[in-house]
Image (cartoon, rainbow, N blue to C red):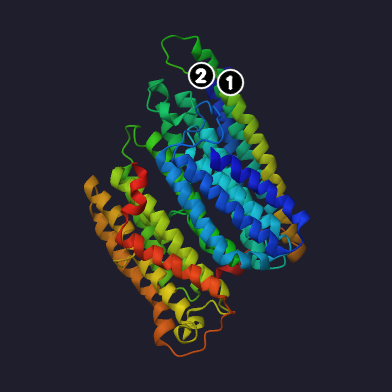
Amino acid sequence: MPINLYIFLALALFSIGVIGVLTRRNAIIIFMCIELMLNAANLLLVAFSKLHLADKANPALNVATNGADAQLFVFFIMVVAAAEVTVGLAIIVMMYRNTHSVDVNFLNRLKN
Amino acid sequence: MNAIILSAILGVVLMFSGIMFKNGNTVRNIAIAGMLILLFANLAEMKGYHFFDINTKNLLSFTRFGLLFNSIAIGATLMYMLVSSRDIVNVGINVAEYFALIFFVLCGIAVITAFQSLLMLFLGIEIVSIPLYILTGADKRNLKSNEAALKYFLMGSFSTGIMLMGIVLVYGAKATFNIELMGADVNPGRNAWYLSGLLLLLISMAFKVSAAPFHFWTPDVYDGAPTVFTSFMATIVKAGVFIGFVRLFEGTFANSGYQWQLILAIITAATLFIGNVTAVFQQSVKRMLAYSSIAQAGFMLFALFSFNSLSREGIILYSLGYCLATVGIFAVLIRMKDYTFEGFNGLARSQPVLAATTTIFLLSLAGIPLTIGFFAKYFMLASAIKNGAHLWLVFFAILCAVVSVYYYFRVIQAMYFRDGHAAIEPTTPGFRWILVFMAALVILLGIFPNLVLQYLYF
């Protein structure tokens, strides 16, 4: 499959994530949209890894990698995302205990 | 490498010290001792003693610039702990964890200042951010603290997502994460990926250093977080991320062949304008300091705008001066009962030492000569003039610095020329001596900035 399809898919996921973060008001859904953005990056990394492996065979291109570093990066992103989930859900639960809501529209006490 | 490994180990040690010692003051003393060890280890590395011989496979590279900044960050954190650690003990019951998280943040800063691969930049920024989300929400019963933590967390991870997409697109174009190899031309057909990747990276880093137009989370988060942790976030962490930004910039943007200066000039001007003008209208000193941190970030952005040796010296001096002064002001602010400007009325009569040192810190932030803040601003502006492009920005920055004098001097005026009874918690002689020491450092380095800058070269 051509790389363009992967790029379109990843950018579509990424855009859905960004738009979700900007428009939704539920903290959990915003959080899911952020995870979607991270996963779009993961997908694209793996696709690029494959692309660079194919490019490596082409002597006209000066490619320094065989793509393994991108796959390594994906694991780091997954670990970091897991750490973020742990902290983020704890913060959302803490918020819920105090306000009994996960609506970010409640977050306006600091404005004035 | 010394700082990265030791700070992680010390963080774990402090976590366990919470089990062994129930008394907050014991943990506090361990933390201060640990910070001293960390400082000496980093200074030893600057002198060439590597405690750990590790091949990082081009993931990290330890430059003099990064190591010097590490020493400044660790030294500033030591000062911060000496003046504010009693207040950290008072935030909540999990004292040991707060100190441990501060050590983990320092570990992240050490990674950021030494990164060579974009993987390490990403990891470093996350190691800094995740403990900070927790510290922001440390005051669990306080709704403002909860709100600040949630806001910081959502904004922070959103910008992390943007940064990751940027890194991936850059990787797609250049087939490497190593910023030293970014200059090489791999495949001209993919320059559009590179450009869009760099743009996303720029946006996400602007988020992290709270540059306009991505600054909107800063005042709310800094205002809502417990004041001790605001002090840490607004100074040492922000300066650390800036150093990462500078390193990223010299690897990617500066040799990409694109014209970045106009974009950066606009970002700098907007940051200076929004930070300074909004700070004028604040009623709370804490919120004023939050906006002032945006304004100071505007000056630090000059290091990216004019990329030369003067700006490298400038960013080092700026981060040192800014960290010292702001940590000092926050240390006094934490003790105040009332955070508004009126709360400072008549402080000079009841607490002359605190008022005098706060005045010196405020003068340094405003950039008055004989303080380190003056030379910091001078180096930044001189580097922009040496660079030559967009000179209107220099005039604009000077105008903004003049505006900043107004809101800094409002505090001085309240302390010295207004009648009132500033309510302040009792302070110990030790606390006052450390403040005097910091003020002396601000003035000493304001007269001899080379005392620090020489370490960039020898």
The label on residue A65 is 2
Identity, as a three-letter code, of the amino acid under mark 1: Ala
Could you say which quadrant of the image residue B430 lies in? bottom right
Mark 1 element type: helix
Q: Could you tell me the amino acid type at mark 2?
A: Thr
x, y percent for residue B331: 53, 69
**Closest to the observer, B137 or A45:** B137
Horizontal and vertical percent position of residue B237: 52, 53
Q: Dot 2 falls on which chain?
A: A
On the picture, is B98 further left or further right than B261?
Answer: right
Residue A68 bears which disc, if any?
1
Q: Is residue A51 visible?
A: yes
Q: Is residue B158 visible?
A: no
Q: Chain of mark 1?
A: A
Task: Give the structural element (helix, strand or loop) at label 2.
Answer: loop
Is residue B46 placed above or below B351 in the rendered structure?
A: above
